[in-house]
Image (spheres, grey):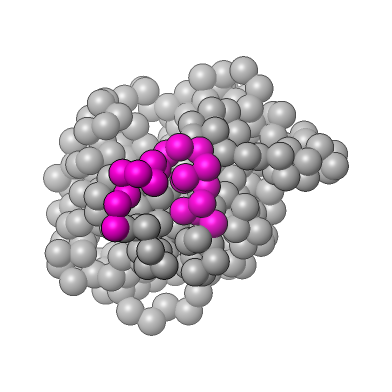
C-alpha cells in the first residue's frame, strides 16, 4: 500500500446511487492506497455502507460543485506531510478498466507538477481538465501556495463561474507560480488531424471562417476538447469515456464504433446502462 498517494473523489448522483464503474474504481484504488476520501452531494445510506469499506465517506449538501467536494476531501485527509501524489477525480466519466486507467496514468515523479489525464486549450487557455487531475510531488502538495489556494476557496454554485474561477483558474494560478501543467494523454499529429476533421465534419468549425489557419499546422486542434473529439484515442489509452459524450454527444460526433464495442460486450453494456440510466 502506498501511503504517499491520496485520492479525493467528488460524487454526485440524483438517484443517490454509486455507479457500478465508479464502485469498481474505488475498490481498485483501495488496493493502491488506504488514503481515499469519497465526498458526495447525494448518496443513499446503503451506498455509504458499501463505499465505506474502501474509503472515508463524507456526505454533504449539494452546493459548490466538485471543487468544494475536492476542498472538503483534502481537508479531511489531515496531515499531508508524506504525500507525493494527490489525485482529485469526480463521477463525470465511465471507467471501463480501472487497472488500465491507473497503470496508464501513474508515472515516476520527476518534478512538482499539476497533471491531468487530459489537458486542453478549450476556453482560450491551457488547463488540466478537472475530472481527473493530480498534484504531484511533496514539494508542491506541502507548499504555502497549495495550502493558500484551497484555504481561500469559497463555494460557488454557478457552473460557468466554477469552471472559470477554479478549473481554468487553478491551472493558471499554478502555472504562474512556475508549476508545469501537464497532460498524461499526449495527442499525436494523427490524433490532432482526426480531431480537426471531426470539428469540420460536425460543423463545429466552418472552413470558410478559418481563413489562413487551414494549414498543416495542427496547433488549432489543441483548442478542441480531447475527451470529446478524441474520445476513441482516450478510451484506448486510459479506458475512460465522459458521461457527457454518452448522454448528450454535444457536437453530434459519430459514435458508431463506440456503441458497437459496448453492444458486443456484456460487461461494458452493463456498465454503460447503469451509468446512463435515468
Secondary structure mostly seen in the magenta stretch: helix
Report if residue 261 is visible in the image: yes
Name which residue lies at 77% across and 45% down.
261
Name which residue lies at 50% across and 61% down.
193
Report if residue 57 is visible in the image: no
Name which residue lies at 60% across and 34% down.
246
Whether residue 98 sits left or right of residue 160 in the image: it is right
Query: What residue range appears in magenta?
Result: 194-212
User: How far across and down, in percent of the image, does residue 199 sit?
Assistant: 46, 45
Q: Is residue 72 shown above or below 232?
A: above
User: How far across and down, in percent of the image, does residue 125 sit?
Assistant: 25, 54
Looking at the image, how many numbered discs can be counted on the residues?
A: 0
Q: Quadrant of residue 139?
A: bottom left
- Is 203 one of the magenta-colored residues? yes
User: How far across and down, in percent of the image, does residue 171 sit?
Assistant: 25, 56
Q: In this rendered view, identify the residue nearer to me: 224 or 275.
A: 224
Q: Residue furthest bottom?
A: 110
Whether residue 138 sits left or right of residue 173 in the image: it is right
User: How far across and down, in percent of the image, does residue 174 sit?
Assistant: 21, 62
Whether residue 124 sits left or right of residue 87 in the image: it is left
Q: Is residue 206 shown above or below 134?
A: above
Q: In this rendered view, identify the residue nearer to me: 246 or 55.
A: 246
Name which residue lies at 36% across and 22% down.
61
Q: Quadrant of the C terminus?
A: top right
- Is 161 one of the magenta-colored residues? no
Q: Quadrant of the N terminus?
A: bottom right
Amino acid at each position: 500500500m502506498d501511503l504517499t498517494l491520496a485520492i479525493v473523489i467528488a460524487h454526485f448522483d440524483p438517484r443517490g446511487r454509486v455507479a457500478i464503474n465508479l464502485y469498481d474504481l474505488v475498490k481498485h484504488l483501495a488496493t493502491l492506497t488506504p488514503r481515499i476520501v469519497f465526498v458526495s452531494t447525494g448518496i443513499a445510506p446503503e451506498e455509504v455502507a458499501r463505499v465505506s469499506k474502501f474509503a472515508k465517506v463524507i456526505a454533504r449538501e449539494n452546493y459548490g460543485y466538485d471543487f468544494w467536494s475536492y476542498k472538503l476531501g483534502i481537508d479531511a485527509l489531515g496531515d499531508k506531510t508524506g504525500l507525493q501524489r494527490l489525485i482529485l477525480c469526480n463521477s463525470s466519466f465511465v471507467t471501463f478498466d480501472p487497472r488500465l486507467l491507473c497503470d496508464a496514468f501513474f508515472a515516476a515523479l520527476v518534478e512538482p507538477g499539476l497533471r491531468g489525464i487530459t489537458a486542453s486549450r478549450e476556453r482560450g487557455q491551457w488547463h488540466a481538465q478537472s475530472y481527473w487531475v493530480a498534484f504531484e510531488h511533496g514539494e508542491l502538495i506541502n507548499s504555502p501556495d497549495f495550502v493558500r489556494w484551497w484555504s481561500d476557496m469559497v463555494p460557488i454554485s454557478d457552473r460557468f463561474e466554477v469552471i472559470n474561477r477554479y478549473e481554468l483558474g487553478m491551472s493558471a494560478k499554478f502555472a504562474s507560480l512556475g508549476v508545469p501543467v501537464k497532460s498524461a494523454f499526449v495527442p499525436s499529429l494523427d490524433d490532432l488531424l482526426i480531431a480537426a476533421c471531426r470539428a469540420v465534419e460536425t460543423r463545429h468549425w466552418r472552413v470558410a471562417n478559418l481563413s489562413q489557419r487551414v494549414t498543416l499546422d495542427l496547433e488549432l486542434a489543441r483548442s478542441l476538447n480531447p475527451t470529446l473529439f478524441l474520445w476513441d484515442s482516450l478510451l484506448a489509452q486510459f479506458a475512460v469515456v465522459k458521461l457527457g459524450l454518452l448522454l448528450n454527444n454535444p457536437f453530434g460526433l459519430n459514435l458508431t464504433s463506440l456503441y458497437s464495442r459496448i453492444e458486443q460486450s456484456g460487461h461494458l453494456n452493463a456498465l454503460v446502462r447503469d451509468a446512463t440510466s435515468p
